[in-house]
Image (spheres, grey):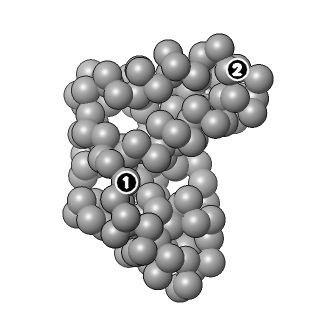
Amino acid sequence: MTFPRLYVDSNVFFYAKIQDRVFGESCSRVLSKIASKEIDASTSALVALEVANALRRYGLSKDVADEVRAIFSFGIDVYPVESADIREAAEIYSEVKISPYDCAHAAIMKRNGLSTIVSADKEFDRVNWLKRIDPKSMQE
């Protein structure tokens, strides 16, 4: 299966790192496909920050710096967060009422011409111009 350039959500990195019992294996497989260039992917600095915070909350503070370094050295575009993204996120929020962080991801995607996100987060399904791909659906 061929995918357009994907935006990788924070839960993909986090679930792969902690080997989540539901999504860990599939998220690790997605990251392996990205590393081998089978999948064209990108993410954002906001994702790296969310992963860092999730690791801290999960009790893995000692892994934060290494994981952030790994995301930035993955060989994919890591888009910055711009003030215009936050203004656009507020507009998206007023329409779909999902997490403002998820709205920020949508805004970053929009600015960069992306419409497909790989994420376990079903809230993205409420953004009508986005297509969410569940990591578990990305089999060999």
Q: Which residue is mark 1?
A: 81
Is the residue 129 above or below the residue 82 in the image? below
What amino acid is labelled 1 in the image? Val
Q: Nearer the viewer, mark 2 or mark 1?
A: 1
- Please tell me how crowded label 2 is: few (under 14), some (14-19), or many (20+) other residues with Cα within 10 Å: few
Query: What kind of element bears circle 2?
Result: loop
- Please tell me how crowded label 1 is: few (under 14), some (14-19), or many (20+) other residues with Cα within 10 Å: some
Quadrant of the image containing the N terminus: top left
Tell me if residue 135 can be seen.
no
Q: Residue at x 51, y 32 (%)?
A: 13
**Left or right: 120 in relation to 86:** right
Q: Nearer the viewer, residue 64 or 126?
A: 64
Give the quadrant of residue 37.
top left
Tell whether label 1 touches label 2 (CB within 8 Å). no
Q: Residue at x 58, y 66 (%)?
A: 100
Is the residue 9 above or below the residue 114 in the image? above
Report how far apart the C-alphas of labels 2 and 1 lie in the structure. 25 Å
Q: Nearer the viewer, residue 31 or 44?
A: 44
Q: Earlier in the sequence, mark 2 or mark 1?
A: 2
Residue 140 x/y as whole percent: 40, 30
Identify the disc placed on residue 60: 2
Q: Residue at x 22, y 63 (%)?
A: 113
**Left or right: 103 in relation to 75:** right
| Number of marks in the rendered image | 2
Residue 49 x/y as whole percent: 52, 39
Is the residue 35 above or below the residue 98 in the image? above
